[in-house]
Amino acid sequence: MIEGRAEHIVSASEASPECSIIAPGCKIGDTCILIDGAFWRVVETVREREEYLVEWGQYPMQWRLRKHWEVNYEMTQQLHSFRRDNPNEEVSFDSYLGQREYREFRIDDDQTVWLCEWQLSRISLSGWVWVGALLPPTDANLTTVCEDPLGPLILGESGLNNGTAWLRIEEADKESRFVKLSGQHHYHSLASANTIALKALLHELQEEAEVIEILDWSEDKPLRSFSLPTQLVPLDELSLKEMNYDLVPDNAYEQ
């Protein structure tokens, strides 16, 4: 399944080794977490019940599962109003873990109500290429043709005005991911192209190519190259403002 975000709001169970016998890619005794209906293996417990590094099945992609807290102003106001209007009433909640913390909300010393949500976000781009075929390192001497605040946007062949071109489709941390465009391109024209023109190039690639070539790039040098079947890369659905997509297992989460 291909999803257009690098971060997802999910539901998550308690971490436990009890279900490792039926969790894909897990060994008996591995700690697992049920995330939106799919078992994930816990690689590292950063903070118990708060933050984990997790993997799904046998695929070497790693994600961060983190509990995020935000103030709920409506509930806070309602609690304050109740206490103001009922000064003699005692307000108590069933404690979770013996503290002022509950499965989905907590109340601090200032009587502020906080709601929590689990966030699942991919860590970098490394170890993500489990549906593609690795290619030999490119022998082309590539350089940045155009860049934006996130780094290189278009790569081209060094020392040439025309040649093969690579367009960035995703970035994470210090790594960027590029797709090889069809045909030869004039670099000056490509660098000045607007979003509509770049989207047209992606559409052309989606329509004409059976296999799409991907290049991972970091610190002005290639990291790895691989190819993917065209139907697995939804180039027509990419937003050039947020050129991100994620390849994740079919049952990793539910919309």
Image: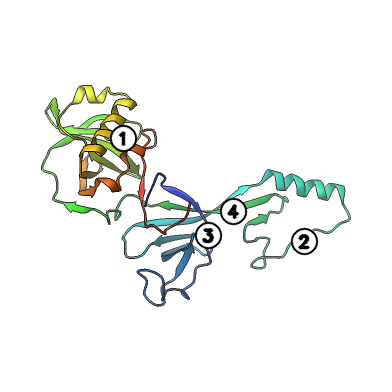
Question: Within the image, what quadrant is residue 204 found in?
Answer: top left
In the image: residue 38, left or right of residue 162? right
Q: Where is residue 222 in the image (x, y as percent from the top left)?
A: 20, 44
> Which type of secondary structure does the marked residue at label 2 adopt?
loop
Q: Which of 81 and 59 is in front in this view?
A: 59
Residue drawn 31% across the image and 39% down it: 235
Q: Where is residue 57 in the image (x, y as percent from the top left)?
A: 35, 65
Q: Name the residue under label 1.
A: 151
CA gap between label 1 and label 3 equals 32 Å
| Mark 1 / mark 2, whichever is N-terminal | 2
The residue lying at 33 percent from left, 57 percent from top is: 61
Marks 4 and 1 close (CB-CB < 8 Å): no
Describe residue 196's horizontal placement relative to residue 223 as left or right. Answer: right
Say which of 214 and 2 sits in front: 2
Q: Earlier in the sequence, mark 2 or mark 3?
A: 3
Question: Residue, x 30% and y 54% (percent of image)?
Answer: 128
Task: Determine the CA span between mark 4 and mark 1.
Answer: 33 Å
> Does dot 1 land on a helix, a strand or a loop?
strand
Q: Mark 4 points at which residue?
A: 116
Q: How far apart are the alpha carbons under marks 2 and 4? A: 19 Å
Q: Identify whether 160 is placed above or below 94.
A: above
Mark 4 or mark 1: which comes first in sequence?
Answer: 4
Dot 3: element: loop
Label 4: which secondary element: strand
Numbered badge on residue 50 = 3
Amino acid type of the residue that numbered disc 3 sits on in the rendered structure: Glu
Left or right of 94 on screen, residue 66: left
At label 2, which amino acid type do we have? Ser
